């Protein structure tokens, strides 16, 4: 089994910064990609940013130029540096990993439990 442990959420003023981190651990695995999603109440979960193991990135239009995703393959950890935060960024952020367990033929998706980000003065 694989666990995704998130950290770094919290309360920040508009215009401020936060850094989210997510570490994957557990059974031996190979990561294809990791990313961050967010879900506001009564809304669908949406992609914020993703990154493949070779460093290719993808961002939602709403965060381009403000958020930066990075991956530390040696530590199986993904980071999301969030800057110029806005009140509309307030919601729960979920870490996601697409990985293959050693010995398995298939890639699967795993989710973290979520971390709250609140942008408010």
Image (tube, rainbow, N blue to C red):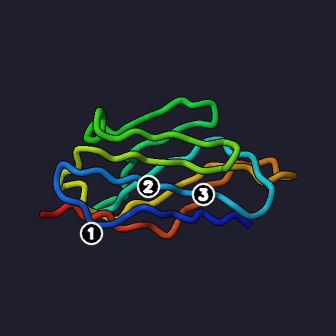
Residue 46 horizontal/vertical position (percent): 36, 52
Give whichever of 68, 105 is nearer the camera. Answer: 68
Say the numbered circle drawn on residue 15. none
Whole-percent x, y for residue 49 in the image: 42, 43
Task: Find the distance from the CA under tag 2 to the CA under tag 3.
Answer: 10 Å
Q: Secondary structure at mark 1?
A: loop
Q: Earlier along the polypeptide chain: callout 3 or callout 1?
A: 3
For the residue carrying disc 1, how many other residues have a C-alpha within 10 Å: few (<14), some (14-19), or many (20+)? few
**Residue nearer the viewer, 103 or 95:** 95
Picture coordinates of residue 7 (x, y %)? 48, 63
Q: Which residue is mark 2?
A: 20
Q: Within 10 angstroms of label 2, few (less than 14), some, or many (20 or more) residues? A: many
Tell me the element at label 2: strand
Residue drawn at the location 23% of the way across and 49% of the way down: 85
Above or below, 11 relative to 49: below
* Residue 14 in the figure: left or right of residue 76: left
Residue assigned mark 3: 23
Residue nearest the viewer, comparing 47 with 83 = 83
Q: Return the residue at label 1.
A: 41
User: From mark 3 to mark 1, how far is it between C-alphas?
Assistant: 25 Å
Judge from the rendering whether residue 34 lies leftward or rightward of residue 19; answer left or right: right
Q: Disc 2 to disc 1, how far (Cα)?
A: 20 Å
């Amino acid at each position: 089994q694989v666990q995704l442990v998130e950290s770094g959420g919290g309360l920040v003023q508009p215009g401020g910064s936060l850094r989210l981190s997510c570490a994957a651990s557990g059974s031996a695995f190979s990561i294809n990609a990791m990313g961050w999603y967010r879900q506001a109440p009564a809304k669908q979960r949406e992609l914020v940013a993703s990154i493949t193991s070779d460093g290719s990135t993808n961002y939602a239009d709403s965060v381009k130029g403000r958020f930066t995703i990075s991956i530390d393959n040696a530590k199986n950890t993904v980071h999301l540096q969030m800057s110029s935060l806005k009140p509309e960024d307030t919601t729960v952020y979920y870490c996601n990993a697409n990985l293959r367990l050693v010995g398995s033929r298939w890639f699967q998706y795993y989710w973290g439990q979520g971390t709250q980000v609140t942008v408010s003065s």
